[in-house]
Amino acid sequence: MLSTESGRPAGMRSVPTGLPTPRELDALTGHRDRVIDLIRIVSLVVVVAGHSIMLTVEVADGSIELGNTLGDVPALQPATWLLQVLPLFFFAGAAAATRGWTSRGDTPTAGQWLVARTQRLLRPVFWYLGAAAAVYAVLSRIGAVAAADVVARLGVQLLWFLGAYLLVLAVVPFLQRLSSGGGVAVALAVCWGSTAIVDVVRLADGPAESGYLNFLTVWTIPAVLGVAYAKKILRPGTALVVAVGALAVDLVLVSWGPYEVSLVTVPGQHLSNMSPPSLLLAGHAIVLCAGAIAVRRLLVVVADRPRVWWWVVLGNRGAMTLYLWHLPVLAAIVGACAALGVDRADVHSASFPVIVGAQTVLLLAVMVPVVAVLSPLENRPLPWWDDPIARRSGPVRNAALLWVLATLGVAILMLARGGLTGDGVWWLVTGLACAAGARRLAVPAGRRTAAGSSPADDASLQVSAPR
C-alpha cells in the first residue's frame, strides 16, 4: 500500500508502483494542514495561467519581441488584483516553515534550519539551470541568436521569486517570536512603513538601487501573516477587518497617490509595483493573506473533498517543477502554433482571446504530464548536496550560514535580472559558490540525528511505496 511522507524523501528509496485512490490518499494524509497545501498549488496554477494570458509574441526580421497584453489593453490591468497571487505562496511557505520549526522538541539554529530548507528549494533549480544553459549554448552555437536571447533572458527571469523567497525564509526563524496580535501588528507596520519610506526616496529621485530593499520588506509581510496563521494568532473576524482596511488604503493609493493600477510590471509604467515591489503591492499582500485567514473555514471544506485533495497532494509534490518549467512549455506551445500560422501578436484581433484562451488551457493540460515526468528530479536527493545535517550549530557558524545564504538570495535576484549573459554569468557563479559554501559550512548530522534530521520539508508531499 502506498504511503505519504513529509520531510526529506527517505520514502523515495523505492519507486512508486502506482498512485493511491482519492479516498486512500485522504486517509493517509490526515496530519497535513490542507489549507496551506491548497493555497500553495492554487496560487501557482493562477501564476502559470496569468503568465500565459499576459504574454504577446511577435516575430519579425529574425527577432522575437515579447510584449504584455496589459500594456496594449490597459482596461485589463485591474484584473491583476486577482491574478497577482504570489503573496499567497510566500504566506503558505512561511506557515509550512513554522510548522516544520515547531514540529520537533528541540529548537534548531537559524543557519542549520535554513540550509535544510535551501537543500529542498534548490534541488530542482540545479537541474533547470543546467538544462537552460545547455539549450542556450546549443542555440548560440547554431546561430539562432533571437531564440538564444529569449532563453538567456526569459529562461531565468522567474528565478527572482526564489531569491526573494530565500531572503524571506532567512527572516522566518526570527518571526517565531511573534505570539500576539499586537506583535503581528507591529511587524506589519514596520514592513509597510519601511516600504513607504523606500518609495518616498525613489519618488524623490533617490538612488534607484534603494528599491531593492523592498524585496525584503514587502515579501516579509505575507511571511508575518503566514506565521500568524500557523500559530493561530489572528482570528478570522480580525483578519477580515485587516484585509478590508488594507484594501481601502490600496484604493486610496491608486486613486490619489502615485501608484498605477497594474500589480505586475507593464511597458510604459513610471513606477513599477512589482520590480521592485511597491507600497501598493505590500498592501495587496496584506489583503490576500489576511483574507486567506478570514476564509480558512471555507477553504477547509474545499480541501477536505477527497478528489480535490488528491490533486492538491500530487500538485504540491511537483510544485517547483510546475513553476520552473511552465515558461519553456509555454514557449514551445506558442512557437509550434506560430509555425502553423497561429500567433498571438495582435491583441486587438478578434481571434486573440480565442488563441490565448486555447493555448492557456493547453498549457495547463500539458503541464500535468510534464510535472509527472520531471517531478522525480525535484524529489530525488542529490549526492552530497542532500546529505543529512544537524539541527544546531555554534553561533559563529550560524551567523556565517545566514550571511552566505542571504548572499545567495541576492545572487539569484541579480541572475534573474541579468540573464545568462554579461553580469548575469558572474552572479550565477557567485550563487553556485554560495550554495556550495553553505553546504560545506553546515554541520553534518551525527548518528543520533541522521535519520529524519531535516526539518526542511513540510513544504511538499512525498507519495511513495514502502520497501
Image (spheres, grey):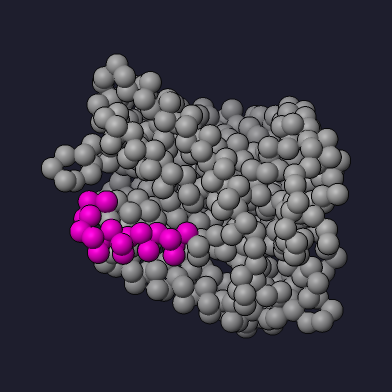
- Foreground of the two, 58 or 414: 58
Q: Residue at x 85, y 65 (%)?
A: 105
Q: Residue at x 39, y 38 (%)?
A: 333
Name the foreground residue: 186 vs 429. Answer: 429
Q: Position of residue 162 (x, y in %)?
A: 50, 56
Q: Quadrant of residue 454?
A: bottom right
Question: Is 140 in the magenta?
Answer: yes
Vertical position of residue 284 compared to residue 151: above or below = above
| Residue in front for this viewpoint, 412 or 177 | 412
At x 62%, y 41%, the residue is 41
Residue 440 in percent (x, y) is at: 59, 81
Name the residue at 73% across, 37% down.
310
Image quadrant where residue 421 sits: bottom left
The location of residue 200, given as percent across then percent down, is 36, 47
Q: Can you see residue 189?
A: no
Which residue occupies the foreground of this view, 388 or 167?
388
> Is residue 397 one of those drawn in magenta?
no
**Quadrant location, the C terminus:** bottom right
Q: Is residue 355 left or right of residue 380?
A: left
Bounds of the magenta segment: 128-147
Tell me the chief SS of the magenta region: helix
